[in-house]
Amino acid sequence: MLDSLKDIAIALTLAGLCALTAWMLRTRKQQILATVTELIQEAENAVQGSGLGADKKAKVIAQLEAMGIRVTSWLDRQIDKIVARLNEKSAWLANDAADMTADAVNEFTETGNGDDGE
């Protein structure tokens, strides 16, 4: 009976250690992804112009390595995914702004406010 209680205690301890390790790894991954997102946004502001994605990515990777973060193939893919998501978000905002502008122009001209009274 005592041996089975020891086995249960050891199994529970190991399970707790595995859960703690998994939580720590997930938390670290989330911190790294948050840092990457911030660095991407900083690189976007620092390197102006379109078609300079490779330069921006190189800047992000250099900053990560300077922080002691090793850029693996997984992290490289995550950088690309974050950039794609930010690009989609920006495009969505630009489309909304264009739609709102078009709606405002249409509303303005339909109500006759654009006439000079002639």
Image (cartoon, grey):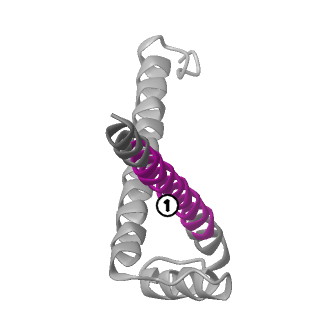
In the image, residue 35 sits, relative to residue 17, either above or below, namely: below
> Residue 1's quadrant in the figure?
top left
Q: How many marks?
A: 1
Q: Position of residue 96 (x, y in %)?
A: 42, 36
Q: Which residues are magenta?
A: 12-39
The residue shown at (51%, 88%) is 58
Q: Is residue 14 magenta?
A: yes
The residue to which callout 1 is attached is 29
The residue shown at (67%, 88%) is 66
The residue shown at (55%, 60%) is 28
Q: Residues within 10 Å of mark 1 (few under 14, many from 20)?
A: few
Q: Residue furthest top?
A: 111
Q: Is residue 36 magenta?
A: yes
Between residue 85 and residue 108, name the one nearer to us.
85
Amino acid, disc 1? Lys
Q: Position of residue 95 (x, y in %)?
A: 39, 42
Between residue 110 and residue 21, name the one nearer to us.
21
Tag 1 secondary structure: helix
Q: Main secondary structure of the magenta part?
A: helix
Between residue 84 and residue 35, name the one nearer to us.
35
Q: Position of residue 3 (x, y in %)?
A: 35, 43
In the image, residue 48 sits, relative to residue 113, either above or below, namely: below
Between residue 5 and residue 71, name the one nearer to us.
5
Q: Position of residue 76 (x, y in %)?
A: 38, 78
The residue shown at (45%, 18%) is 107
